[in-house]
Image: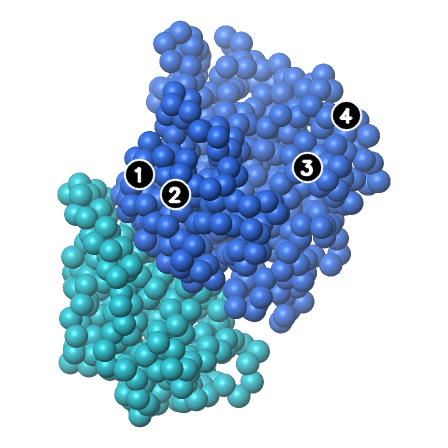
Chain colours: A blue, B cyan
């Protein structure tokens, strides 16, 4: 009875949100319904746990979720998911609520949910699920995640307690090591490719998740993801994976999995892991062969907001979003710039981190990243902006090997001033990174004035 | 030549602390003309702390304390000699707990540091991350230091004549959010919760550490600080940002 009234209430809230403010539609209905019936997720009917997948990890959750959804729906399956990225209990509850009838029955073939790492246990307690995909476990959002081991222990507890089938990134040591305690494991990976990289010995790697000694990487496909081996206990990914993206051709935008050629919808190297993960999942859960999955790659369009280009007074400003508390995304940004041989200006908008209270300053992760290839890639200037962190950004670039004379500091967060400074540059090719909200303001101003 | 050992860099590897190792090297070169930065870990044979002037321990995960602590046993006597001689151990972030005693973990188990500092630690259920501003007393100088805390453990430490506070908290959590104490100093060694590029962004502290360590080793370095204009500007921006935070926003 309690469930029924919460369900009706949630559906009414959802209806109202659709009329008033759709942007609040991914969490609110679930949040308000769960206030009436906290365990309401347990009462939905028609959910076969073997058809439920949780996607967790530091990076790649949303993109992988989107791609799996895309492949399954192209094959005619009905999928319930949280594509808007609301990955806490309330977001998943909202998705179920929207998909159910007035009795709580859900008629769907698959249930695919991106899940926040920290709340994974709570979500699994409320929603039976047999399949867990772990993209990677990296340094990220340290203000609430602390260190990777904090998240590793949370995911590991779920994997052990619920005996789920695990889909694991074979090339990321922590994710890979979760398989040591599981009976059903599918591993995915990416072969070394033309954009794989190495770092010199001045950089740190990471402790082995088994013995805490040093993990050595023979190459990286992403930061701390690649060919690895522990110098002490020998833990490695040398046994390979079940599904591997191979023969990546970034110029012609193709790759293969199990000898089947795929089109590469996005050519950022880190996407190759999302591709192999998706191919693995749809084959193992839905029986979709790689040949069939490949057809869906041709028209896959990912969520927006990661990469955008704006035009302002003759400048092509290429925006790339990186998470300031996440060295992997910063290294990706650097690598993308380094792969462009044309003359360019780089605008860096490190800011204060405002995800949770209290806001704080984090300029840590530039020191984990290798700037050397970017420095050699025909950069004319580094423009460090924002009013609080610009000096630290400039300093970290100097420690990274940038000639101080190439650095200009503009201590402002005013997007009009930043745009004017960009307009004065001698080159039209501009790379920009800053927090999304600030970029959206800049986009609006550029749209009006540029 | 100033010699710096960067201890267990791939195990005590968090929060971009490579920056602090580079800052120690850079300012050692600026003040002393020449510097060496060596990585030291489990695989390093015949490591002798007394071959160095500064040992830098960055933050690591609490799960690593046991294995690192066990490895430190092989040179513990020489490490104590090193510290007693006035050379400098710099331990940042959670690694303060590695130098203390018992660490109570969230799962009910206990692990142990090496027991050098009279301090105990309790692992936090929830992480606390924020800026931290202190007035530090080090090597006879009082200085403003601004950095960060990503607090995974709360430290209980009572000052005595030998083990003193590293600084008094102006803003932030310090050792535990209660007593206004940040970190521990013993002779010229510093054990602090502050992390991230604290030595990059506070070069006045870095320089003083280098001077203290050099003095203990009988090496000559410049007495005058170089130009810290960029870092001073950064400090003022951060102090302004911290001052504007709403009272009570720390949410401890």
Instruction: State if disc 4 and disc 3 touch (CB < 8 Å).
Output: no
Picture quarter containing residue A214? bottom right
Q: Which residue is mark 4?
A: A295
**Tag 3 or tag 1, which sits nearer the N-term?**
3
What residue sits right under mark 3 in the picture?
A275
CB atoms of marks 2 and 4 within 8 Å: no
Mark toward the start of the polypeptide (2 vs 1): 2
Side of B232 relative to A74 (left or right): left
Which residue occupies 20% across, 75% down?
Answer: B138
Secondary element at tag 4: helix
Say which quadrant the N terminus of chain A sits in. Answer: top left
Nearest the eye: A79 or B50: B50
The residue furthest bottom is B218
Residue drawn at the location 77% of the way across and 34% of the way down: A262
Position of residue A445 relative to residue A226, above or below, is above
Residue B104 shows in the view: no
């Amino acid at each position: 009875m309690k469930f029924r009234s919460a369900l009706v209430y949630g559906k009414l809230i959802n209806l109202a949100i659709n009329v008033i403010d759709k942007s609040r539609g991914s969490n609110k209905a679930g949040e308000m319904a769960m206030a009436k019936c906290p365990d309401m997720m347990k009462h939905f009917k028609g959910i076969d746990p073997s058809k439920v997948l949780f996607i967790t990890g530091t990076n790649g959750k949303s993109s992988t979720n989107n791609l799996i959804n895309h492949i399954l729906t192209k094959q005619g399956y009905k999928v319930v998911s949280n594509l808007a990225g609301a990955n806490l209990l309330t977001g998943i509850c909202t998705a179920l609520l929207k998909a159910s009838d007035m009795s709580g029955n859900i008629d769907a073939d698959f249930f695919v949910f991106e899940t926040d790492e920290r709340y994974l246990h709570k979500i699994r307690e409320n929603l039976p699920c047999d399949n867990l995909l772990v993209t990677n476990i990296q340094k990220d959002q340290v203000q609430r995640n602390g260190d990777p081991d904090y998240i590793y222990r949370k995911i590991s507890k779920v994997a052990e307690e619920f005996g789920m089938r695990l889909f694991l990134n074979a090339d990321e040591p922590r994710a890979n090591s979760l398989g040591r305690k599981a009976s059903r494991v599918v591993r995915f990976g990416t072969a070394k490719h033309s954009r794989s990289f190495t770092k010199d010995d001045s950089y740190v790697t990471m402790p082995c998740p088994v013995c805490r000694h040093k993990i050595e990487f023979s190459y990286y496909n992403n930061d701390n993801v690649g060919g690895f081996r522990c110098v002490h206990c020998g833990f490695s990914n040398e046994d390979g994976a079940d599904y591997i993206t191979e023969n990546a051709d970034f110029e012609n935008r193709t790759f293969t999995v199990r000898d089947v050629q795929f089109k590469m919808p996005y050519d950022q190297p880190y996407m190759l892991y999302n591709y192999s993960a998706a191919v693995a999942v749809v084959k193992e859960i839905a029986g979709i062969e790689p040949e069939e999955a490949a057809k869906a790659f041709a028209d896959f369009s990912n969520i927006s907001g990661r990469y955008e280009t704006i035009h302002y007074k003759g400048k092509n400003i290429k925006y790339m979003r990186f998470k300031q508390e996440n060295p992997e995304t910063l290294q990706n940004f650097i690598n993308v710039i380094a792969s462009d041989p044309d003359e360019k200006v780089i605008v860096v908008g490190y800011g204060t981190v405002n995800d949770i209270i209290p806001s704080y300053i984090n300029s840590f992760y530039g020191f984990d990243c290798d700037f050397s290839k970017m420095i050699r890639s025909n950069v004319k200037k580094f423009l460090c902006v924002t009013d609080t962190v610009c000096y630290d950004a400039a300093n970290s670039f100097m420690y990274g090997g940038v000639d101080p004379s190439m650095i200009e500091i503009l201590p402002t967060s005013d997007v009009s001033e930043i745009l004017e400074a960009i307009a004065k540059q001698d080159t039209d090719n501009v790379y920009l990174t800053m927090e999304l909200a600030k970029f959206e303001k800049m986009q609006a101003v550029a749209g009006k004035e540029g | 030549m100033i010699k710096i050992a960067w201890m267990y860099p791939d195990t005590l590897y968090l929060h971009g602390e490579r920056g602090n190792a580079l800052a120690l090297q850079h300012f050692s070169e600026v003040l002393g003309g020449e510097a060496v930065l060596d990585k030291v870990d489990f695989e390093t044979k015949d490591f002798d702390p007394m071959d160095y002037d500064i040992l830098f321990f960055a933050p690591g995960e609490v799960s690593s304390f046991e294995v690192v602590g066990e490895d430190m046993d092989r040179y513990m006597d020489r490490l104590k000699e090193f510290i007693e001689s006035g050379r400098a151990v710099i331990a940042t972030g959670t690694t303060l707990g590695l130098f203390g005693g018992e660490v109570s973990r969230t799962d009910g188990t206990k692990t142990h540091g090496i027991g050098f500092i009279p301090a105990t630690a309790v692992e936090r259920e929830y992480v606390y991350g924020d800026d931290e501003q202190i007035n530090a007393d080090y090597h006879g100088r009082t200085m403003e230091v601004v950095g960060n805390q990503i607090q995974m453990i709360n430290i209980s430490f009572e000052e005595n004549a030998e083990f003193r506070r590293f600084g008094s908290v102006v803003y932030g959590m310090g050792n535990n959010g209660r007593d206004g104490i940040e970190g521990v100093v013993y002779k010229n060694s510093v054990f602090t919760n502050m992390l991230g590029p604290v030595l990059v962004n506070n070069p006045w502290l870095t320089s003083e550490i280098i001077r203290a360590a050099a003095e203990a080793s009988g090496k000559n370095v410049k007495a005058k600080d170089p130009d810290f204009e960029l870092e001073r500007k950064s400090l003022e921006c951060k102090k302004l940002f911290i001052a504007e935070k709403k009272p009570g926003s720390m949410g401890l």
